[in-house]
Image (cartoon, coloured by chain):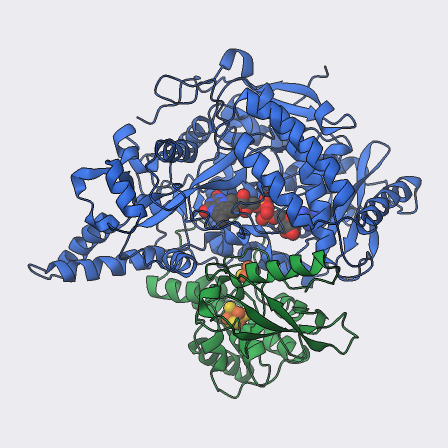
Chain colours: A green, B blue
Amino acid sequence: MNLTLKIWRQKNSKDKGKMETYPVKDISPDMSFLEMMDVLNNQLIESGQDPVAFDHDCREGICGMCSMFINGEAHGPGRGITTCQLHMRSFKDGDTIYIEPWRAAAFPVIKDLVVDRSSFDRVIQAGGYVSVNTSGNTQDANAIPVPKEDADKAFDAATCIGCGACVATCKNSSAMLFVSAKISQLALLPQGKVEAKQRALNMVKQMDEEGFGNCSNTGACEVECPKGISLENIARMNREYLKASTS
Amino acid sequence: MSKLDSKVPEGPLKDKWTNYKDHINLVNPANKRLIDVIVVGTGLAGGSAAASLAELGYNVKAFCFQDSPRRAHSIAAQGGINAAKNYQGDGDSTYRLFYDTVKGGDYRSREANVYRLAEVSANIIDQCVAQGVPFAREYGGLLDNRSFGGVLVSRTFYAKGQTGQQLLLGAYSALSRQIARGKVTMYNRHEMLELVIVDGKARGIIARNLVTGEIERHSAHAVVLCTGGYGNVFFLSTNAMGSNVTAAWKAHKQGAFFANPCYTQIHPTCIPVSGDYQSKLTLMSESLRNDGRIWVPKKIEDVKAIREGKLKPKDIKEEDRDYYLERRYPSFGNLVPRDVASRAAKERCDAGFGVNKTGEAVFLDFSSAIERYGKTEANIQGIENPSKEKIIELGKKVVEAKYGNLFQMYEKITDDNPYETPMKIYPAVHYTMGGLWVDYNLMTTIPGCYACGEANFSDHGANRLGASALMQGLADGYFVLPYTIGDYLSKDIRTGKIPTNSPEFDAAEAKVKEQLSKLIDNNGTKSVDYFHKRLGKIMWDKCGMARNEKGLNEALVEIAQLREEFWKDVKVPGKMNEFNPELEKAGRVADFLELGELFAKDALHRNESCGGHFREEYQTEEGEAKRDDVNFAYAAAWEYKGKPGDAVLHKEELKFENIELKQRSYK
Ligand SMILES: Cc1cc2nc3c(=O)[nH]c(=O)nc-3n(C[C@H](O)[C@H](O)[C@H](O)COP(=O)(O)OP(=O)(O)OC[C@H]3O[C@@H](n4cnc5c(N)ncnc54)[C@H](O)[C@@H]3O)c2cc1C
Ligand code: SF4
Ligand code: FES
């Protein structure tokens, strides 16, 4: 396949940035999207140009590092996948593809397609944990049975990879899906229930401080989330938050 | 030749760790506040170590090259984590886990370390559950288990196909808690490029801020390297793109011995290579071998027809299929250890029975499992005389619940639906048992420099059993290092802050800057990947699944030549003082080009086959690995002497006092 790429280029956080056009040739439909980007970068390097910076590591949809806004969609066309799981067979010969970074006040651009998501880390630091020491002096793992249904739901929420697609997709740049996934996971488990109230209050406070927007229930985040994190989590988080702020 | 002191405590195996803990020096809480520790890496090993040390009261500085500690390569681990809990009541015990691990490692690991690992394993599960790790559970609310290769019990705990993710997020949450308390200072997007040694002790690191390109000095009383494995020396592997050997290699060049570099695990079930643009290989978890059956056609004409698309795998009759693992290893069947399964796949493909276009793939088939589960499910639901379709439908649901995300991952990559047609799989580089040599305290041969997790030469001998890397990483970080490092640091309570303006820091920084400028100003013509791919090809062809003297000798020469060419002709765009991913890659590949040579040298010197190290010259008549316990029952620890090829060998003789050395048999 031969394609035309329109890519956001921005030297650093202070640069204004603009879209640039690059043609690529002989792309195999079996390539992953990032392998196609590798081809482009090798081409740029060998012709003395600056390669396009983008984040990636595992290339199998689990580390949450890759983050491209492709043709107006977080992680591109296709549901339930990250950018690195997108394959070129989703495109046609002759297509023009627009590639941009996540855009949100809380995710400033570092270079080209690379953004700073440390705001997510700070939200977790505000309370996304169970306050238990790692000394090993804990009770036996089977001492408290957990209903399978709760465990499964907690697991589903815990599969969030912290990629930020939900924020990038949301017109308000809200982080509700990400934050609610962690709050739900821990609220569903007996180990996390003890601190549930304080956790909800602290994480929501930090989320607001980081400059993430409000949730207006459009549900775009759920659609674009590569891990299928459900809106139910937002509802659960709102309940937890309400319980916490009224007691 | 200096003798390596493993510092294994005296006494019976069972009591060593307890006795050790009873007698080490402790640091009182007030003094811990005066001590700084650097932890490089935030995977399972580093994340758990940093959190635990901070909880104890030390001041911790933690580093990772990703944009968040939560993204370390451990996140990608799929199948599970072992622990001798014996929840299934199937005869598991600390001793059995210890025994399986030593045997699985083909009798090339240190007994005392492995026993300690088995001993603390159960506690890991308690710890993780307390942190809110959502392991899989049964309907009764208790934890579920599955089986992994090389063992006869069910001791693997799991969270669907995302066990590594869930465990890492557990460690990350503990780490985040300590960051919030101010006890850990986290340096994301930082790469350690040199170890700083002052008066013979590890006292700090030089790191590059990957966003600004700034070179920074960080000092501490001890440095812990938890920087993962070096499988990417093969270019194609299941490791994350950034996984590298740099931190360990820099430590090696400063005096830390590097042990058993040639012990590499080639994982049998990965998605086969499809083209030369390929940037990485994807693992299909070993847990799939619980339910998937591996086969190739018996008849070569069927193989041809399948390759040409004239026959589908489903069209091959049961009696025309060769379930070669079940045939060769009736007692372990599809669950033989990884090294055995990988070589068996290679043997069939070399004989011409590979089932894809490249001839390098075998089938992993779930149809029997789907049918079996479907029947059980129909019984459970009380459906009488269920139709074949109903059975398949129910069976698919069960399989989906167990492996859904893996099946989805497979389909995304290959465009084939594994519920309908068998997966195609082939072995790929996955894990490195070799690494920095450490004593019982997890200290390298540089005082004050520790190595944990995959970065050390570890407890897995010549072959790691599935689900044991996660166990080891967390054991090291949560339960072992916090004790052993205290013993060392107890001598540092009066040292005071380590200054960073010393000549040692000056020299280390200058060295780092020199290498970086050399790369940037090189004005070559070829990209970093060009060299990395060529190195990978040499490694895979000559130091891969099967090795021989001739090939290894060639590899030694070719790698040295390639390294020379790299330094003449590599082209690194951009500048030093900016965000520059190509420059990061260049530094990593430069180190792989040195490690590769030591790797080949180690493989060449070990005139035996053991675990993942298979020398064609040393095999039994049935093609199984043939060890030489008289001459090679040692860990090979290499000392750097100016060039990778000039490294000097030190031997740690391995004593087996509790386990009898036997030929490993899974028949
Ligand atoms: C696909 C896959 C599946 C697996 N599945 C399983 C499984 O089911 N069960 C099991 O037991 N094992 C499994 N393994 C193996 C296991 O995941 C790893 O061995 C283990 O996670 C390694 O953990 P670690 O903490 O040692 O290193 P890693 O998780 O690799 O972490 C390395 C850390 O070091 C940092 N780092 C590296 N170099 C530098 C540097 N120079 N400067 C700064 N930071 C640096 C990185 O940023 C990272 O934080 C799997 C491995 C793979 C590849
Ligand atoms: S909720 Fe989904 S989209 Fe948002 S960070 Fe988590 S995985 Fe990504
Ligand atoms: S690179 Fe890890 S999720 Fe895409």
Vertical side of B440 occupied by A15: above or below: below
The outermost residue toward the bottom is: A216
Q: Is residue B577 left or right of residue B358?
A: right
Q: Is residue B318 left or right of residue B526?
A: left
Expressed as whole percent of the image width and height from the top left, the position of residue B312 reads: 25, 51
Expressed as whole percent of the image width and height from the top left, the position of residue B96 reads: 40, 30
Q: Is residue B291 left or right of residue B575?
A: left
Residue displayed at 36% across by 46% down: B356
Residue displayed at 76% across by 33% down: B253
Task: Give the total of numbered labels.
Answer: 0
Residue displayed at 49% across by 52% down: B164
**Which residue is at the front of the view, B186 or B403?**
B403
Expressed as whole percent of the image width and height from the top left, the position of residue B163 reads: 46, 53
Q: Can residue B181 be seen in this view?
A: yes
The outermost residue toward the top is: B630
**Which residue is at the front of the view, B193 or B486?**
B193
Q: Can residue B24 be seen in this view?
A: no
Residue displayed at 39% across by 62% down: A151
Vertical side of B251 occupied by B659: above or below: above
Q: Is residue B506 left or right of residue B206?
A: right
Expressed as whole percent of the image width and height from the top left, the position of residue B176 reads: 63, 60
